[in-house]
Image (tube, rainbow, N blue to C red):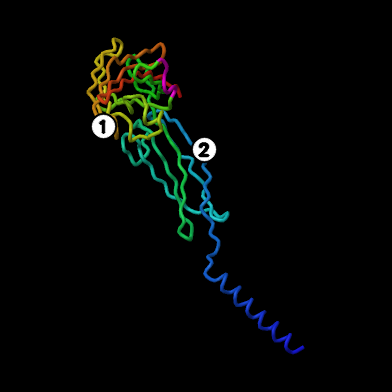
Amino acid sequence: MKKIIITLFFLSTFLISCEKESTGGVSRVTNYPEFTLLGDDVIYVNKGNEYIDPGVIVTEGGVEIPYETTITGTFRGGTTLDTNVVDVYQIVYSATNQDGFSGSIARTVYVIENGDLTTNISGLYTSTVVRNGSSSAQYTNMEYILVWKKDNGTYEMSDGIGGYYAIGRGYGNAYTARPVIITANDIPSNSFTIPAFTVGTFGGVASMSGLTANSVNNTLSYTTIWDAGYTFVVTLTKVNI
């Protein structure tokens, strides 16, 4: 009987020892930041109107924690949201929990100017593009191409090939063709002066011609020839927000 008791005692001691080793160094549970975006994830604001950001709620384990906000203007490089400056603004809300783990959520704000296409070609446009004489458009109703009026009276377009690579192919803004600077000599007679520009990361020289503003159809149309051997026929349709 004594032998059995001693054996059981040693076995119990061995199991307890192993259990302590197997659980040693295991970290405790951390609660990652959880984000609730207030308001819409995409917001449209007319130039000059007030914008009040809805913000977010960030919690850690059910308890609200502070967050930081970062703003970037996509095409004009601002670090604050200025409704007098037409652009596509990315607002990123980020927070870090008590263990140093971070997270974020984002919102897009379009500040736009609605031109009448008779005296002003500014606007937010969807884009349809036909490349190299194809019988049908490769991409239709892409969202969005932006046209804005600059302080010196010229206009600028966010992508001179209508978003073919940046939006249609999904390559991102590094593949926009710009800067497209447009001098409107006379909009009703479609008299415009447009210097050549570059096709983003691909490089090369692109030239836009035949820019036509149609106030009846709410469209801008043009042809861009890229020296890499591609021709883009673009139709932009203005979106009324």
Residue 117 spot, x, y in % from top left: 35, 16
Left-right relation of 176 to 6: left
Q: Quadrant of residue 23?
A: bottom right
Which amino acid does the dot numbered 1 rest on? Gly
What is the distance, in whole Å, between disc 2 and disc 1 at their CAs? 39 Å
Residue 7 spot, x, y in % from top left: 69, 84
Depth check: give the residue in front, 175 or 187: 175
Does the magenta portion include 217? no
Residue 81: tell me if it is visible.
Answer: yes
Q: Which mark is residue 203?
A: 1
Left-right relation of 76 to 126: left
Residue holding disc 2: 39
Residue 154: tell me if it is visible.
Answer: no
Residue 15 spot, x, y in % from top left: 64, 76
Depth check: give the residue in front, 51 or 114: 114
Which amino acid does the dot numbered 2 rest on? Gly
Dot 1 surroundings within 10 Å: few (below 14), some, or many (20 or more)? some
Q: Earlier in the sequence, mark 2 or mark 1?
A: 2
Q: Quadrant of the N terminus?
A: bottom right
Q: Report the residue that reaches farthest toward the bottom.
A: 2
Does the magenta portion include 139? yes
Depth check: give the residue in front, 238 or 7: 7
- Extent of the magenta region: 135-141
Q: Residue at x 46, y 47 (%)?
A: 104
